[in-house]
Structure formats: structure tokens, C-alpha cells
Amino acid sequence: MQQHDDRHHDHEHEHAHEGSALPEIALRVKALESILTEKGYIDPAAIDAIVETYETKIGPRNGARVVAKAWRDPAYLDRLRTDATAAIAELGFTGRQGEHMVAVENTPDRHNLVVCTLCSCYPWSVLGLPPVWYKAAPYRSKAVIDPRGVLADFGITLPAGTEIRVWDSTAELRYLVIPLRPVGTAGWSEERLATLVTRDSMIGTGLALAAGGA
Amino acid sequence: MNGAQDLGGMMGFGPVQPEPNEPVFHADWEKRALGMTLCASALGEWNLDISRHSRESLHPADYLSSSYYEIWIKGLIKLLAARGLVSAEELEAGRKLVAPRPTARSPLPPADVPAALARGGPTERPVAREPRFAVGDRVKTRNIHPTGHTRLPRYARGKLGIVERCQGGYVFPDSNAHQKGEDPQWVYSVVFAGTELWGEAADPLLTVAIDCWEPYLEPTA
């Protein structure tokens, strides 16, 4: 699968038709939306509302709040271990592609990595829409057979002797990685801790940022 | 089905290419593709598993040379045509040629979008039978190659693993994707050693967990 969509821009002259500068897929999507609207099957304003939700309301900041709270609050971490869906819902994060959540914790001995080899399953309610690389063939093919190679692609090397557990999201459970809390953050507020939690650290292709860097 | 979607363990795609400061969408058509896919599924004419099967049934060469939103749109176009909602002729003409028909559910009103997204589509269901397996059980995945939809990846078929968690009962995709009912089954997180999946040369510190519906598993001594 293509990792980037820039091929459409590279080849837009080949695909352009009737003087339009839009690539073929964009024209097809436009035609489809106009037919669905004309036939009364969809309301384009509903599409706008969906797009706005994932552009402005639902994204990795949600997950960062979950992680920061779990780092600070042992009772919350316990609830996250017992019923992650309910614990995450306490913060108001529910819904599509987050209906059944599982939190997996990194430890000094074990690193967790999440993938969906069969499609692009991803915990939308806490991380938003997946990045292109998560949905593309290089990641989906390599994560289960060579996760350390994948981490190297992200510039990450784990200490020797660290176990790697890969979670292939084959069913409707959606996985959120709780990265290791960086050293030097004792006494930090949840809000400040959340600034160290990157999207990739919650997928397992990254680590939380070091305290000095935030 | 043994289609191009089943990518685990394939080689030759090159390194993963993270994109610094990646935008949520890379083009306007991607926004419309996402929203349209969700709005069309809200019509209730198909379920999640049917959508996935429509995408994975693309020709492997087409699947592998398409971006993910392209795959979504190609899958959606097939479903709309199969259900008689939008024909190939209409798509070609770019306008309505046939009168619309009533759909299972009415179109999603914009005002209902926040509630619909917050509700999602839970697939956990009660299962009448007791779970066949318990945490700690050694199990073997079945060596199956169905021509229809399945969520047991090829790399994990016929492999020995250990049940780590019972995750509850869920709609069974192998049935639900073919309109044979939800047929809820217990789902287990089964853990496999890297060496069991990939042979002796595998990373000895790798384990892979896969969520398996009960019919994918058989007991082992």
C-alpha cells in the first residue's frame, strides 16, 4: 500500500481529465458524494461534522491525558487495568473505534507495540485517526516479524534484553500503550506530564519524551 | 480469505516512513472519503465486517497500490453497487440516473453526528455457552483457509499459543461478514512465541498476541 499520497500530485497530469487539476481519485470521490447527496442517502453537512470532530476534538491529546493520569494516580491505573473502557470513559473519551479498550503497560523489561496486520484498527477515541504509516504495508507487514527493525525505523533502540510484545488488533479490542514514565518527573501535574506523552509512545513506536526536553 | 490485506510477515515493502508533523488529512478528498464512508455505513445496509470484506476483496495488485482512503472508497463503491444504491453508470455519469430506494436506516442528520460517534458500534455480545478455554490453557490455532472473511491471519494458523485473557463474547466476523448472523463467540488474547511463528531464527524475546474467536482454536495436550 502507498505510504504517501504525493504520488497523486506527482502524476496529476497523467490523471487529470477535462481540464481539472484534481487527481482521478479526488474526482471520483467528488462524483460519489454528489450522487449520494442527490439521491438523499447522505447529508454533506454530516460529513463536515465528522471531519471537524477528528480534526479538532478527537486526537492523541485524549490518550495523553489517560496516560498522565495513570502515571500519577495508582487507583486510576488499577481501574485502567481492570476495565480500560470504563476508566477511559471517566475522562469523557468513548465511542467509535474505542468501544472495547485494553491498556498495556510498558515496564523496564517489556515494551509493547500495537499493529493491525489485517486492516487499520486503531483506538480512535484516544488517538484520533491513524497516521498514514500505521495503515501502510511496511508497518503492517514488519511489526509482527521484526518489531525491533520497526523501532529502528523510528530511531528507537531498546536496552538489550528488553522483551517485545506485539499486539495484533485482529478483533474489536483496541490497545493503548502506557509508556514508561520518564525519570525526573516526580511531583509533576497531570497536565505537565501529558506534554511528554507522544502519539507514537501510545502505539509503541516511540517512547515518552524526556523531562528535560518538554 | 488469503488476500492482500493479510500482510503480517510479508517482506520487501521497505522501511516504515514516519512523517513528522503529519496532518490529519493529506487532501480534501480524504476528508470526504472518511465522512462519506461513515455516513454510508449509517444507512444500515451493511455491517463493519461486510465493509472490511469488501476492501480485502479488491484485486491484490489494486489493494497494494492504493492508499488506505482509496481502498475505503473502492470498497464503498462496490458495496453501493451491490446494494443497488449507486450504479456504475451513475458514477460514470456523475449524477442520479435511478430513483433512490428506502434504506434500512434513514440518513445520518448532521446534528446526530456527535452522539453517533460517541456511541460507536459496540460488538460485545452475550454468549450462551461457557468459554471452552481458560487463562493459561495451551491452544492451537486451526489451519483454515476460508474463501470468505476471517480475522485469523495466515502467519498465525496452525500455531501453538497460550490463552492470556478471555476478552468476552463478540460478534463473529466470519459469519457476520456474510449475512449469516452475528453468531457471538468468546474472544481470547492468545500469545505466541516469536519462534513458534517465525522459526528458530526469530527474536527470542518476541511474543505476539492475537485476539482469537473461539472457533479459531482447538485444545492441545
Image (spheres, coloured by chain):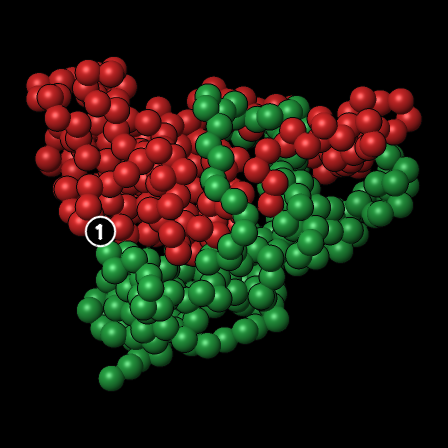
The residue positioned 89% from the left and 45% from the top of the image is B89
- State the image coordinates of residue B136 (x, y, percent, origin top left): 19, 69
Q: Within the image, what quadrant is residue B127 found in?
A: bottom left
**Which chain is tinted green?**
B
Q: Amino acid at mark 1?
A: Glu
On screen, residue B118 versus residue A111, left or right, reads right
In the rendered structure, the colour chosen for chain A is red
Residue closest to the eye, B118 or B136: B136
Quarter of the figure with the N terminus of chain B: bottom right
Residue A41 seen in the current view: yes
The residue positioned 56% from the left and 73% from the top of the image is B146
The residue positioned 63% from the left and 49% from the top of the image is B64
The residue positioned 44% from the left and 65% from the top of the image is B155
Residue closest to the eye, B11 or B144: B11
**Residue farthest to the bottom?**
B221
Residue closest to the eye, A50 or A29: A29
Mark 1: which secondary structure? Answer: strand
Q: Within the image, what quadrant is residue A91 found in?
A: top left
Q: Which residue is mark 1?
A: A163
